[in-house]
Image (spheres, coloured by chain):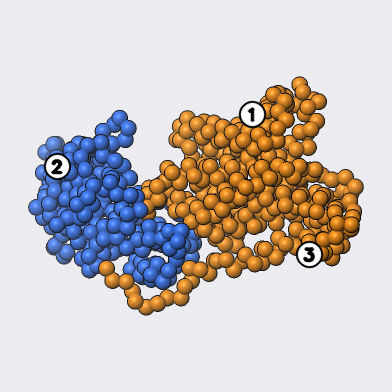
Chain colours: A blue, B orange
Amino acid sequence: MSRLEAVGIDAGYADAPILDAVDLLVPDGKVTVLVGPNGCGKSTLLKTLARILSPSRGQVLLEGKDIHALNTRAVASKLGLLPQGPVAPEGLTVRELVSQGRYPHQSLLRQWTRADEEAVEYAIETAGITQFADRSVDTLSGGQRQRCWVAMVLAQETRLILLDEPTTFLDLKVQVDLMDLFASLAHDRGHTLLIVLHELSLAAAYADYLVMMKDGKIVSAGEPNDIFTADRLKHVFDLDASVLRDPVSGRLVCVPVGARRRVLEAAQ
Amino acid sequence: MTVAAAPSPVRHSARSWSGVPVLLAILAGLFLLHIAVGAKALPLGTVVDAFFAFDSKDFDHVIVFNLRLPRAVIAVVVGATLALAGALMQGVTRNPLADPALLGLTSGAAFAVVIATSVYGLATMALLPWIAMAGSLGAAAIVYIIARLVPGGATPLSMTLAGASVSAFLGAVISAIHLLNQETFENLRVWLTGSLAGRDVTMLYYVGPPMLVALLAGILLAPRVTVLAMGDDVAQGLGVRTGPLKAQLLAVVVVLTAGAVALAGPLGFIGLVIPHVVRLYVGSDYRWIVPYAALAGAAYLLGVDIIARVAIPPREISTGIITAMIGAPLFVHLVRRRTR
């Protein structure tokens, strides 16, 4: 069963088509990671699934209904989105930022309630930012800031969470901590996550379901154990790399061969 | 999903309506003082009496109601609307330098009024607000189009530069008309510096109701401005229909700016400075910035107008000159504070 599904969607900006008849079932309660070379359409797919962009053909189904037939607020109460590189207004405190996640649950008549307060506290705790809750977001480090945004999406209380490159520009340790948080959201708390990632080894390590895109199409999808191979990396990314299994974690990692190595081989 | 059951102290409302009574008290004090000072200084007691025990034979009471009260009310309305419009614009454009004057809306309104009155000889007061509205909307459109044409699109920087250029251009055209058309211009000379002196109170009857509606709409829309200030994608992800919201906010800002210009001429710096001052106290959530900016803007313009009236007796300085003389250094101070 899947709450979020793309059925034969074409999409893109204005007259530049990017997605070409994409079908995707996002498995419930799992971490799905979307990878692909720059410009392959992975962000476009994420935005179309989040109803930011409209497909020119095909449908996005949210709980079986056409997402574009639902209103923005109804979508926002079922699906949370963290876009790429969001910027908080200067001086906004962490708690204020996280509180914005309650927006879809509020209206002119239904103002701030105990339930909102509890959702915000839960989000702050889960994202591990309790100790900065009253500081202003722009005084925090990149990793802490990203946790604040994740907390904002958590405060939205949606099963589905879509994240566009949430680990870009962060230190490796911070990336790993964030991925651990995402994995725990899916496995311990029942969220369904769809994440666009750049880091291939991180994608292979954390994805329950890995989706590889190229030129606006999904070329490979499945468990990393089955599809994360040197052949596919060559085909999708035009990357010469070895795929190895780390003996400690049992996870797959990719090691780029690089031009210098190839030159040495050629010389031999 | 499970939600932590432990109830938490409601710290969210720490920044709340608690400052409103304080600001209202300051506002009331300045309001009475504003009425009391002037060519004939009135004791505050007389001013209060005029409100609560009006005596039509008492000349002082007549001064309060016929001469001074309209000006004080106009100061409150104009100060509140310009500050609120500035706060909304700063949120929507994610630009700390946004302000009806800096983005060309004020000069657009002034330009339209000048053209209508001096070139076409328009005399009907009732039409003036509409003309001002068309002018500020037109200027906003031009500024936005210019900013979009710049490589990189409508960024805070390109918007500010386009606004400054459009304002400068419209200002130059106004000056040219001024030189060619001295006579009719004499009537507009004081108004164009931004003045509350001798304003016709009937204008308030025309622009007051729509401005009040826009003011309330601005306060109601304020929480969404915070969401919008986090970027379009984030806002849409949270369920905000960004296109319609921006259109509503533009309408609010245009009505407020045009109304303020029709009432008091192009006053600068209030929309720019007041929201920044307010931020120091209430933080960055527009839910609080917007209503507090309205109150603080009203108090600020009352205070400025008191100075304008008492600084060089028996004459008075144009209010717009004082707002700029106080506003500019205050703004520089705020910028320095932020960058430190």
Identify residue type, mark 2: Val
Q: Nearer the viewer, mark 3 or mark 1?
A: 3
Distance between mark 3 and mark 1 Cα atoms:
49 Å
Residue B173 or residue B253, whichever sits in front: B253
Amino acid type of the residue that numbered disc 1 sits on in the rendered structure: Phe
Residue at (18, 59) in percent of width and height: A28
Rendered residue at 89%/57% (across/down) = B57
Placement of the C terminus of chain A among the 4 image quadrants: top left
Q: Secondary structure at mark 2?
A: strand
Label 3 sits on a secondary structure element that is helix
- Residue B288 seen from this side: yes
Where does the N terminus of chain A fall, quadrant-wise?
Answer: bottom left
In the image shown, does B163 or A199 lie closer to the viewer?
B163
Q: Chain of mark 1?
A: B
Image location (x, y in percent) of residue A253 = 17, 54
* Residue at image mark 1: B169
Q: Are marks 3 and 1 in contact (CB under 8 Å)?
A: no
Q: Is residue A259 visible?
A: no
Left or right of A149, for residue B271 = right
x then y, percent, for residue B257 = 62, 42
Label 3 environment density (alpha carbons within 10 Å; few <14, some 14–19, many ≥20):
few
Q: Position of residue B271 (x, y in %)?
A: 63, 48
Q: Which residue is mark 3?
A: B52
The image shows residue B309, relative to residue A192, as above or below, that is above
Q: Residue furthest left?
A: A226
Residue tagged 2: A219
Q: Marks 3 and 2, Cα distance to the nearest angstrom?
A: 81 Å
Q: Amino acid at mark 3?
A: Phe
Q: Earlier in the sequence, mark 3 or mark 1?
A: 3
